[in-house]
Amino acid sequence: MPDPLRFLLAALLLAFAAPAAMARSAPAPATGMVSAADSRAAAAGTEMLRAGGSATDAALATMFALTVVEPQSSGIGGGGFLVHGTANGQVAVFDGRETAPAAATPDWWLVNGQPMPFGEAHPGGKSVGVPGAVALAAAAHRRFGRLPWARLFAPAIRLAQAGFRVTPRLYRALDTSRETGALSPAARRLFYTAAGEPVAVGTRVRNPALAAFFTRLARQGPAAFYTGPNRAALVAAVAQAPHNPAPLTAADVTGYAAIAREPVCGTYRQWRLCGMGPPSSGATTVFAVLKQLERFDLTALGPNSPTAWHLIAESMRLAYADRDRYLGDPAFVTVPVQGLTDPAYLAARSALIDPGKTISLVTAGIPPGAQTLSRAAAPTAEEHGTSHFVAVDRRGEVVSYTNTIEGAFGSGLMVNGYYLNNELTDFDFVPERQGRPAANAVAGGKRPRSSMAPTLVYGADGALRLAVGAAGGSTIPAQVAKAIIGVLDWHLSAQAAIALPVLFAPGDTLYVERGSALEPMIPALQALGHAAVQPRVMPLKANAVERIAGQLAGAADPRSEGVALVP
Ligand code: GLU
């Protein structure tokens, strides 16, 4: 994707981020916990736990509340992936990723043979995929819910009806989006003054349209989203968008289905990791980064060692090369998941890593089961606009769930008080290179490749050790792998592991978090052969819950407004 602009926008949103209110919780007896990017959304989750709800009930109530209070990042106008673990470690995953309209073709993002600039592509109708969040919620609730469906909406309806206060983070997102002019009139009316200024931090904003729609959804079930007036409004918003109108149809909306998939699981040292496979690149990428590092003694090196970060960078370069080449919607391309997570294949990839120097040319490998037709997809730089949250209930069930509308305020189109995503910009803009189709090329009904990586980590005793995930586009697997290394190899608390700086190496350039402890390591990394190491403000926002000696401890990114709450 042509996206210095996206990176810049994400950087801008974060550059003004004040050091966040600290968001953590002391270890608590395992009666349950919810960690989320917003305290009111986390409280919606703990309300479900207090009412006897399951982790799934809590996570879904959190998602509905986030639609109200964190509208820039996530909500029912988007999609996501939910990873569920039972108390005895059985893992199920739900794919609620958006789909492209049936009429979409591989040249969707081409104008006169050239990729559309991102700033043109994300606002308006063409970037909108059929939202999967409500279908996912219904599927997960049918299987793992304990409370009535309608109960899950109560906190979100209250927040939308009574109003919620604008946080500094929402304000900054509104301020940045004002410049781009990407928000629809309905979206502007809610959050901007008549003079076009974002409402001030602390202003109470009511969203009666969303309260009314949630009330219908609570009473009528998911059909209220995928049929009837909401469907008509959604189709009209996209098809009649003033900018980039697109041929989304009623049949596209009604035809949407969330998919229960097999989790992608593997072992890293004595731990078992499970996460979300294709169409997400999350689990395979996180797993490859870790597995390729297994032969190194990261514990002995520790987080202050440039060699440790060099090894992480090298492993990431290898993993992202495979990600870019092979990952896409498995209904459209053959993704060799088994091969990509095969210990022997990853050991061979790991053998390319040298602690004393960089790999001069990193290319994708050929994992078992790979079809030679698969080809490299251009690395995309997704912008900030996602939320990860974790819920654990007193029965020991856990949900690790990442939900997104893709960029800040998604497409900028609003229907019934919620924002529609711009997820279709996660497809490759150029459908082929050197005559070969891209794994992540646009197609009708296809799900765009994601980076979201909701993850569960189990100890050798079979008990949950960590549930973690992040927002931040293609940096997500880097954030999640780093948090896991922090907890498992560096024996940090989940909170300290999330707070560690991030190194992101999607290709030959290494990005290190600006102003962090990694910046002084740049000369050492350069001495190891990394020619391009750049300090960057990156869109980072992770949430986690860990279990230590039978107690739960929450973690939320100190760069965010997140919290972890007990019921
Ligand atoms: N749309 C992105 C993905 O699914 C996430 C965007 C973000 O985290 O900012 O990978």
Image (spheres, rainbow, N blue to C red):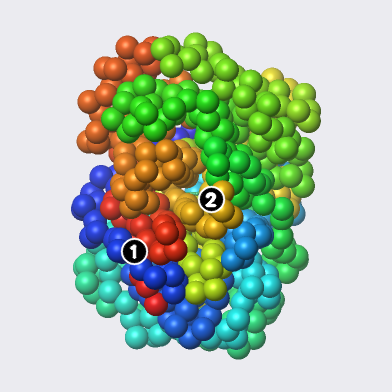
Which residue is nearer to you in this view: 439 or 364?
A: 364
Q: Where is residue 559 in the image (x, y as percent from the top left)?
A: 29, 51
Q: Residue type at mark 2?
A: Gly
Q: Is residue 397 left or right of residue 437?
A: left
Residue 33 appears in view: yes
Q: Where is residue 104 in the image (x, y as percent from the top left)?
A: 70, 48
Q: Is residue 462 left or right of residue 555?
A: right
Residue 175 appears in view: no
* For marks 2 and 1 on the same chain, the one whose residue lies earlier in the sequence: 1
The residue identified by callout 1 is 27
* 10 Å crowding of disc 2: few (<14), some (14-19), many (20+): some
Q: What element carries label 1?
A: loop
Which residue is nearer to you in this view: 48 or 116?
A: 48
Q: Where is residue 385 in the image (x, y as percent from the top left)?
A: 43, 53
**How far apart are labels 2 and 1 at the CA level?**
18 Å
Name above or below for residue 375 compared with residue 385. above
Give me the disc on residue 459. 2
| Residue appearing at x 24%, y 74% in the figure | 203
Which residue is nearer to you in this view: 319 or 170?
A: 319
Name above or below for residue 125 compared with residue 439. below
Q: Is residue 3 left or right of residue 169?
A: right
The quarter of the picture where the C terminus appears is bottom left
Q: Could you say which quadrant of the image residue 77 lies in? A: bottom right
